[in-house]
Amino acid sequence: MKTFSRFRLLPLLALVLAAGCSDLGIDSGASEVTGLTIEDGSGNALVTVNASGSVNGTLTVPRNQTRSLRVVLRGPGGTVTPGITESIRVTTTNSVVAQWTETGEGTGTLRGGTAAGTTNLRVDLISAGATAYTSPAITVQVT
């Protein structure tokens, strides 16, 4: 009898999981991303990329110093959370001037190199192994 009662709960569990799948973000993000915001550790917006691809703001970091940052993806309905098969990748074009080190999904530290200079940073949303969104170049100034 105990085994039978466990199996009676399986359809109920399946319904609960099916109803909650939208919360898991299984298919969110890739088609919805239209821009992003890069925030500092206090949640202040430093750079904004809007739906037309226009970049507002510049990231600055002192030489040999780090700065904690967070990438927030944006879509028509507000914040877009990457799904289970999606990830955020941040790269700099010149790692001698500045480097990004990921500390969590969409969070990381930007480190200034040993010399002052300028480089660019790009943010990609990777969905099931393919690039679904790439930001325009975001200027990074090392002082």
Image (tube, grey):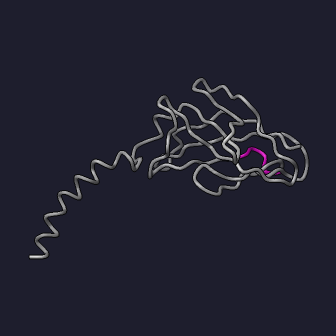
Range shown magenta: 91-96
Q: Residue furthest front?
A: 42
5 vs 104, nearest the viewer: 5
- Residue drawn at the location 79% of the way across and 53% of the way down: 66
Relative to residue 56, is residue 88 drawn left or right? left
Relative to residue 91, is residue 85 drawn left or right? left
The reply to whether the magenta stretch includes residue 80 is no
- Residue drawn at the location 13% of the way across and 76% of the way down: 2
Relative to residue 90, is residue 81 drawn left or right? left
Relative to residue 137, is residue 34 drawn left or right? left
Quadrant assignment, res 12: bottom left
- Residue drawn at the location 76% of the way across and 50% of the way down: 67
Coordinates of residue 56 in the picture (x, y in percent): 71, 28
73 vs 98, nearest the viewer: 73
Coordinates of residue 28 in the picture (x, y in percent): 43, 42
Decide whether the magenta segment is chiefly helix, strand or loop. loop
- Residue drawn at the location 60% of the way across and 49% of the way down: 106
Q: Residue furthest top?
A: 52
Locate the C terminus and report the quarter of the image it occupies.
Answer: top right
Locate the N terminus and report the quarter of the image it occupies.
Answer: bottom left
Tell me if residue 137 comes above or below residue 15 in the rendering: above
